[in-house]
Image (cartoon, helix red, strand yellow):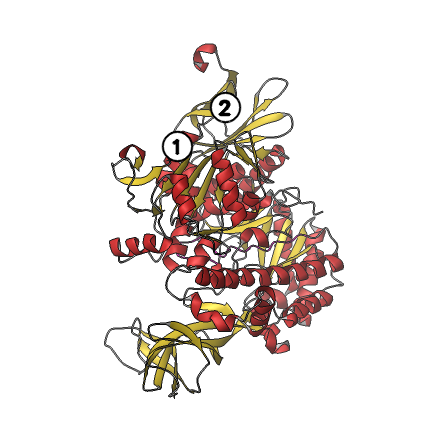
Amino acid sequence: MTIRNHDQSFGYWLNEPAILDHQRIARAMADLGASGYGIVRVIVRQTSFPHRSREVIAAVASAVAAAHLHGMRLVLDCEPHVLVGREMGRAFPQAIGQRLFRAAGPVRAGAFRVDFQLPTMDGLIFDHIAAAAIDDGVLRAIPVPDHQLVWETTMAADGIADERQDYIAGRPFAMRRHVRISGDATSIADGTLILYACFREHALVDFAAPEARQWYRDLIDDYADIPLDGLCWDEPAIAGDWQSYRYGQAFARRFAELNGYRLQDRLHLLDAPGLSPATARVRLDYYRTLNETLAEAQADCIAAARACFGNHILLGNHHTWMGEGGINDYRAGAVDYFRLNDPMDAGYTDCCWWDPASVAYSYALGTSLGRLTPSGEAEVNTWHWKPTNRSTAWNARLMSLMRITWFNIWYGDDADTCRFPSHYTWPTAVACMRRHQGYQRFLGDARPVVEIAVLHDWAGVCATNLVHAANLHKAFCLNLALRAQNANLAFDFIDARLLGSGTIVDGALRTDLGTYRLLIIPGAAVIDRASWHRIQTFAAAGGHVVFSGPPPTLDADGGDLTGTFAALLGIAPIHADAYDAWFRMACPQLPTARPERFDLAFPMAVDPERILRSPEGDACGARSPGGQVIWFSGYEPSEAVLRHARRQIPASVRCHSATVLYREYRDQDRTLLMLIAKEDEELSGLVDAFGYRVSLDGGESACLVVPDVGDAYIHSADDAGRACVAALTAAQLA
């Protein structure tokens, strides 16, 4: 088992200047060691030297020796894309991944022409047409027709899709790749021809390829004589968007092995209109296989690394790319964060300080993932272009509140973020890191007290395969996380495995992560049978369930859920297709990125007394006749869900302050209340908790400690903090 002890991490770019001058490496390790960091994560960037070159191996050996000299551990990050992808492709061309693009064009008297407009200068190389379908009133697969290929690199005014080199005064230019597939096949009926074209991408890895896994075993052998303390992949799932699908020849073979049919034969169903058992099956199989090939490749690499360097090694594969607006990871290959977390030594996510919702979401997800790992820790890498002392102090104490081990990125005056001893924020960052680490170690094995679970599932989003549904589901998760954080309302993310294997005890859902009295189910148009059964049992036992977004329509095996959901809520059956069609009509321009608010709700015909309304009086949902089940029928009703959760799970702490955030923890013999000041604030006011009153008058952070035996006291790593605690009187309790 890895012993982490809340050692804080710092990222170091091993770029060309450092590779050529090891004195730079020695100075960096001395700076980080003297500052109190315990882990250095080295990533090879901005260099022509490949990972397996003598120069990079020697530089890593120098970095390991210097890190150990200063009492730190060093983890090598060898992310499976960009530099690694190019290097792997030279050794094993068959390990390179592909992207699958869909395009359609008319067929008239057998003649057809289909144009593919590719992303701007992505370096894609046409490989083959993977599948074809015809829509002449009935959508069906057909054999790929004989065809000719025309490939052009074109110059077009930005925002103008054109196959010619047009000039428009005052408009910037963009380089584009244009592919035309044409032919004459009299056997094809008139209609619309749909083609799926494969393009090789030199920086993309096919995780299903045995050669990709062999390349990583060979890399580990190259470094076997270096006493590395860990090995990880930073963002293994990357380059995903909603214009294409991640693909590969080895992936296609693995898909057939896992699912019993060829994906090529049903590719057209990925983008066929509507949600049906047939379309849901192919979509769920595609995304599940995409996730599983990454999980298998990751497990193979981890096993090889542990065999070489020892079972104690640190890892660090984080699968969230960024929680920013409009970004989700499904088509990049990171579909199920919980499945990918299985072999990890800690929970890993990342966030961007300039996006508070991404921070709140990444911390909530990270702590949930982390408590399922041997160390129980969550490590989050923090992007912070142009940091300030104030932003550093605020985010450090927010990490203390959520018990997040800080992965600070990056060190260097030639990296993309400013974290260097000569930068004015360096002393603040070091002081905040040490204070934060002190709180983490003081809390020890304490676990957060949480009574709310939010299902973080992929099936509902992937089964519909709609970009706006994916973005709005991500928006709900991020916005709810930020609103709950600011409202001092704790929740865990759980996955379908935790939900489906949970037990119902005294009206509560007991899982391997925690025990919950309120279950929130967002975007579950499709849900597995075990989870659905557990939801029904939980509600029947007196548990509270809140649905949001598209209504449950199918189970993962294609069984109809519209009737059982309608009976659970006491409404008429509603299909997810009808739900989405209403939104398209009511809002023709559905959000294509993450909105902070999208307060539009699907209307329901229910008894007036069961309608739920917003503070403005607008209908936003309905409750079941018994009140145990709620459906907030908007795509992104995080505000309404938060209002209901606060009423349903009343706070055990009374906070008489507008400047304080708190989080309750519990270990074997004590209860702890971590208190921090909100951004741009200091601690002030009164907090009543567990029979005690805390008076706050300045400082940034403190922790109320209430032992099972003995008197309560205040622990503070904040030298400027001023807090006192006293037992509450009967009058105060009243």
Image quadrant in which you'd find residue 588 = bottom left
Name the kind of residue labelled 2 in the image: Ala
Horizontal and vertical percent position of residue 331: 48, 63
Is 513 situated left or right of 472 in this image?
Answer: right
Q: Which residue is identified by label 2?
A: 723
**Crowd band around label 1 with a 10 angstrom C-alpha radius: few (<14), some (14–19), many (20+):** some
Q: Position of residue 239 (x, y in %)?
A: 48, 65
Residue 322 among magenta residues = yes
Mark 1 against mark 2, which lies toward the viewer? 1
Label 2: state its secondary structure. strand
Dots 1, 2 in contact, CB < 8 A: no
**Magenta-highlighted residues:** 314-329
Q: Residue furthest top?
A: 730
Q: Amino acid at mark 1?
A: Gly
User: Closer to the camera, 704 or 349?
Assistant: 349
Residue 82's spot in the image, x, y percent?
Answer: 54, 69
The residue under label 1 is 627
- Where residue 240 appears, x then y in whole percent? 47, 64
Q: In the drawing, does residue 616 fall left or right of residue 518? A: left
Looking at the rendered structure, the secondary structure element under dot 1 is loop
